[in-house]
Image: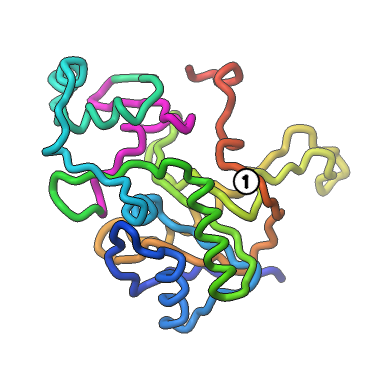
Amino acid sequence: MSTIQIIGLKGLPIVKEGDNLAKLICEATEKQGTPIRNGDIIVVTHVVVSRAEGKIVNLDEVKPSEFAKKIAEPYGKDPALVEVVLRESKSIVRMGYGKLITETKHGFVCANSGVDISNVPGERVVALLPEDPDASAQKIREEIRRLTGCDVAVIISDTHGRPLREGEINIAIGVAGLKPIRDRRGEKDLFGYVLRVKQTAIADELASAAELVIGQADEGVPAAIIRGYQYPKSENAKATELVRPKEKDLFR
């Protein structure tokens, strides 16, 4: 019987710009008695990655444009926050019910360009998405390998909503060391039927599984280890492989 463990990492300090996040993760795993092993998957929330990389903005230092003010007024939003959201976007996809859905510079379609106001020190401080989440994941992976000698995969996660489902889930916005999609086309099912369209977004599934132990409020768990899952390895995969091309998107 295969068994998968999901282990939350406690004891990480408040991450600041310039911190060696991989080193902090390794130290936390040792301290709680769950040292990193070969084949582990490390899932890290984008907010702590963004804090370490200095992708933080003080809204008091943002001068909103007239366009941002125009959008903010009917929805009762902070014009400075809207300005930051617009700066981080390539386009506005939808507006309604007080929500602003955008396409980020990375190509992700999400609320508010992924700008996060939670788990960031300061009432007027927000975290942006990392500039290059895949590169961030690879940097953490390489540093963990240098510090421990272990070959791991790294996923940087973010909370996203879904167009046809209530509630939010964690998805992968950055990956390193694993293929984000497991292509099962050509395999046979229990009754011998050859699968023709089966492609599983395993990076998103792993990110959501990790959220079961990662804290969004006061738990102080910004990362998790997933242990025991046999993932397809890759040295050049990107999380944007999970983004459906616009020409195939039936909801835009």
x and y percent of residue 129 in the render? 38, 42
Residue occupied by mark 1: 180
Q: How many marks?
A: 1
Q: Is residue 104 covered in magenta?
A: yes
Question: What range of the chain is rendered magenta?
Answer: 96-119
Q: Is residue 9 covered in magenta?
A: no
Q: How is the image coloured?
A: rainbow
Left or right: residue 147 versus residue 98 is: right
Q: Secondary structure at mark 1?
A: loop
Question: Few, some or many C-alpha atoms within 10 Å of disc 1 (few <14, some 14-19, many ≥20)?
Answer: many
Q: Which amino acid type is shown beneath numbered disc 1?
A: Pro
x and y percent of residue 13 in the render? 30, 70
x and y percent of residue 207 in the render? 50, 52
250 vs 121: above or below? above
81 vs 71: above or below? below
Residue at screen point 15% across, 20% down: 69
x and y percent of residue 155 in the render? 52, 53
Residue at screen point 31% across, 32% down: 112
The N terminus lies in quadrant: bottom right
Residue at screen point 35% across, 33% down: 113
Front residue of this view, candidates 170 and 78:
78
189 vs 62: above or below? below
Residue at screen point 27% across, 65% down: 14
* Extreme residue toward the right, this view: 192
Left or right: residue 133 versus residue 120 is: right
Front residue of this view, candidates 86 and 223:
86
